[in-house]
Image (spheres, rainbow, N blue to C red):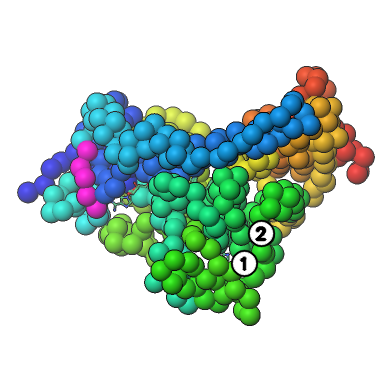
């Protein structure tokens, strides 16, 4: 016996939850399947709790910046309010009742368990079979991975999921992986008094960003007393009941805690993708501009490989919903995917880095302006690290990429994202008036620098 419905959504990350709710509100019968928590990684283990941690760490650092600028301040970090806020305000102690009620309130039917495709238009959850008349939406997201380092799997290391549940800041921490998760968590715990070393295999932190961003964040980390190890090969990890020991060839690091932040793998195994002609061992599910992955199958979110961000998941959900409802709309465009690493300074970028543009054989020139050299940056003084870097196509006279690093770098990025998305000529950007004295006025200086460099 099987239930016939219009749409089955497997996995309720931010995009899946949104799509299921919107399709139900449009009058379709929707079954929404989730094996863990409605809303996915972002509200419970990722964006939201980690940004609460970042906010708290930022407050501490601002307090430390008072001397010499505004009097005196004594800062005594205490993790207890952070842990409480994550439990009480962000995650309801990892209980998704509010989100589940919000979804069912929109008319979707929530089914808990592992969904698996068992035939074309057919999904099975714990023996219940659903026939999806219009189709299946996949939003199964990712899970943390750990590299195959000798001994590591036998140790009680943290991933992001344990780090956000910490009830106290450890005395010492090794962070393995200098990507976004690693960089954000390194600075948070260090500012709460934890002795932190970040260990990265590549020759720089934040490998996907401009090299200037990597150099600056390293400099800031080292100034804040964080140990930064790049270009290293971790050969073994052990835990003696109290402490982790990490071997880097002849050298050893030890710490109370180890956070592994070396990337994520898509949740595709066991999903039954072979029934719809897709490959479960692939790194991503390829989709067209309307998020179609196969006949009657749409895929959204991290599993599409178009940017592992909540805003991409939500953007794609909107496009898939339109397509399922048969509405007109532009296909997905990814030339202006924004991304913000919430360190201090924030590292925000959109579109292509200079290196990515050159790899695509785009003729480009770049312009730079340092935030400390801007009026606002000079006034700001303590904590004014940052720069704006623009990547202009010399053929089109438009920005194909940009980076804004600094206080509120993520907010300055909004301007640059519009410029890249709308392909506004840089000649027009030069004609604009930039408010004085703002951080974003550095964009005007970076535009002038484009010309200066020819
Ligand atoms: C520490 C950290 C911080 C982050 N911070 C940010 C940030 O500040 N800003 C930002 O934009 N992004 C951030 N991200 C990325 C962001 O969390 C993800 O991009 C976002 O969650 C979107 O993922 P998704 O929609 O693909 O699904 P996910 O959020 O991964 O959710 C997928 C859901 O599918 C469920 N599922 C999987 N398989 C099945 C199955 N077979 N049956 C039923 N259910 C299934 C899972 O249980 C899960 O709930 C962060 C990530 C991490 C790890
Ligand atoms: N602010 C945000 O928007 C935000 C925050 C966190 C995460 N995210 C998303 O989550 C994704 C995953 O983040 P992540 O930081 O886990 O992955 P990542 O891919 O960004 O970084 C992983 C890092 O670990 C390094 N690494 C891998 N194996 C290693 C080893 N054996 N030894 C040392 N280093 C090793 C890699 O070289 C890489 O630099 C990101 O790509 C991003 O899209 C977004």
- Within the displayed image, which quadrant is ligand 2 positioned in? bottom right
Give coordinates of residue 169: x percent, y percent.
49, 49
Q: Which residue is mark 2?
A: 227
Is residue 285 in sight in this rendering?
Answer: no
Viewer-proximal residue among 449 and 293: 449
The quarter of the picture where residue 65 lies is top right
Q: Main secondary structure of the magenta part?
A: strand
Q: Which residue is mark 1?
A: 201
Mark 1: C-beta under 8 Å from nearest atom of ligand 2: yes
Q: Residue furthest left?
A: 1
Report the front residue among 409 and 381. 381
When asked about the image quadrant of residue 200, the answer is bottom right
Q: Residues within 10 Å of mark 2 (few under 14, many from 20)?
A: some
Local packing at callout 1 (Cα closer than 10 Å; few below 14, some 14-19, many 20+) is some
Badge number at residue 75: none
Task: Report the quarter where the C terminus lies.
Answer: top right
Which residue: 22% across, 49% down?
Answer: 113
The span picked out in magenta is 110-114
User: Does residue 162 show up?
Assistant: yes
Q: Is residue 112 magenta?
A: yes
The residue sitting at 21% across, 45% down in the picture is 112
At horizontal 37% and vertical 46% (from top left) the residue drawn is 139
């Amino acid at each position: 016996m099987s239930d016939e419905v219009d749409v089955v959504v497997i996995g309720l990350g931010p995009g899946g939850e949104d799509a299921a709710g919107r399709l139900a509100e449009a009058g379709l019968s929707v079954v929404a399947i989730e094996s863990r928590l409605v809303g996915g990684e972002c509200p419970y283990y990722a964006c939201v709790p980690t940004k609460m941690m970042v906010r708290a760490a930022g407050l501490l650092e601002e307090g430390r910046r008072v001397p010499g600028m505004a009097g005196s301040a004594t800062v005594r970090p205490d993790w207890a309010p952070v842990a409480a806020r994550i439990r009480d305000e962000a995650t309801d102690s990892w209980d998704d009742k509010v989100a589940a009620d919000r979804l069912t309130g929109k008319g979707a039917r929530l089914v808990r368990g592992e969904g698996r495709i068992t035939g074309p238009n057919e999904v099975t959850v714990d023996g219940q079979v659903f026939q999806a008349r219009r189709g299946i939406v996949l939003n199964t997201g990712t899970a943390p991975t750990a590299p195959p380092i000798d001994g590591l799997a036998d140790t009680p290391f943290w991933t992001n999921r344990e780090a956000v549940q910490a009830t106290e800041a450890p005395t010492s921490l090794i962070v393995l992986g200098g990507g976004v998760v690693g960089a954000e968590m390194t600075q948070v715990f260090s500012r709460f008094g934890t002795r932190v070393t970040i260990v990265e295999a590549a020759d720089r932190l934040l490998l996907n960003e401009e090299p200037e961003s990597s150099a600056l964040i390293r400099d800031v980390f080292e100034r804040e007393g964080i140990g930064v190890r790049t270009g290293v090969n971790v050969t073994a990890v052990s835990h003696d009941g109290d402490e982790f020991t990490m071997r880097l060839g002849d050298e050893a690091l030890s710490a109370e805690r180890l956070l592994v932040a070396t990337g994520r793998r898509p949740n595709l195994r066991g999903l039954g993708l072979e029934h719809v002609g897709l490959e479960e061992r692939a790194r991503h599910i390829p989709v067209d501009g309307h998020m179609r992955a196969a006949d009657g199958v749409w895929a959204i979110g991290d599993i599409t490989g178009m940017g592992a961000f909540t805003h991409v998941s939500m953007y794609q959900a909107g496009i898939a919903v339109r397509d399922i409802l048969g509405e007109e709309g532009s296909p997905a465009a990814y030339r202006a995917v924004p991304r913000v690493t919430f360190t201090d300074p924030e590292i925000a970028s959109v579109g292509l880095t200079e290196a990515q543009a050159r790899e695509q054989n785009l003729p480009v020139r770049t312009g730079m302006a340092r935030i400390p050299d801007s009026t606002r940056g000079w006034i700001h003084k303590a904590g004014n690290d940052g720069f704006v870097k623009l990547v202009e196509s010399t053929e089109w006279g438009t920005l194909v990429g940009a980076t804004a690093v600094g206080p509120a770098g993520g907010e300055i990025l909004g301007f640059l994202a519009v410029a890249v998305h709308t392909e506004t000529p840089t000649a027009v950007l030069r004609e604009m008036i930039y408010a004085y004295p703002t951080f974003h006025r550095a964009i005007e200086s970076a535009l002038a620098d484009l010309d200066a460099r020819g």
